[in-house]
Image (cartoon, rainbow, N blue to C red):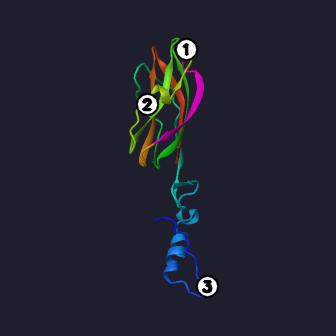
Amino acid sequence: MTWSAFPTAVYQQAPPYTWWNTYIRDNGNETAVAKATTAGYHFVSTGTNAIAERAILGASVDATETTTSTSYVDLATPGPSVTMTTGTKALIWMNVQLGNSTSSQAFASYGVSGATTLAPADSLGILSDNQATGAGGNRIGVCDLRALTAGSNTFFMQYRTQAGTGSFLRRRIQVMGL
């Protein structure tokens, strides 16, 4: 249902009873107050005179884990990941402390599955500088505004290295459905 524009009233003419249902009851049910079901959620426009409740969710994995893979993979503890209903866009924040055992790069990226399919890629992610930093590494974050297919989408992080052993800890992902 969407908001209905009010008709123009005519002087000394009683409005029909159907106006009450359409312009008072139904329009009232299209307000944020009527649609709010979850504390802490926000509202986005889904079209002309239409709104939907959306979430801001986050997840984390704190353990230090490593990979020698040069392709994006899950670590021993996959993720972090969040699943939510989105519209056609979302803001994705990621941060991670990452390093490499050699003077090579370590990469962390996100992907999306569900209504949208998007594989992790270097262009979406975080990379360490070319310093042998091991698990201490650099703590780095990025934010991305991503076009999506509306529906249930799962946002997840994966990892790779250019060479050597990449170390990853304090992994975080936060997603704001739009």
Q: Residue at x 57, y 16 (%)?
A: 133
In this view, 61 is above or below 25 = above
Magenta stretch contains residue 146: yes
Q: Nearer the viewer, residue 50 or 54?
A: 50
Q: Is mark 2 on a helix, strand or loop?
A: loop
Which label sits in the foreground, 2 or 3? 3
> Alpha carbon of mark 2 to alpha carbon of mark 3: how far?
63 Å
Determine whether the residue tagged by mark 3 lies in a helix, strand or loop.
loop
Tag 1: amino acid: Asn
Q: Are marks 2 and 3 in contact (CB under 8 Å)?
A: no
Q: Position of residue 136 (x, y in %)?
A: 58, 21
Q: Who comes first in sequence, dot 3 or dot 1? A: 3
Q: Which range of residues does the magenta coloring cover?
A: 133-147
Label 1 Cα crowd, 10 Å radius (few <14 / some 14-19 / many 20+): some
Vertical side of 77 occupied by 129: above or below:
above
**Residue 100 rendering spot, x and y as whole percentages:** 52, 17
Disc 3 designates what residue?
11
Residue position marked by numbered label 2 in the rendering: 120
Image coords of residue 106 (percent x, y):
50, 20
Q: Badge 3 local density, few (<14 within 10 Å), some, or many (20+)? A: few
Corner quadrant of residue 134: top right
Residue nearer the viewer, 113 or 17 = 17
Mark nearest the camera among 3 and 1 is 3
The residue type indicated by label 3 comes to Tyr
Q: Residue under circle 1? A: 130
At x 48%, y 36%, the residue is 80
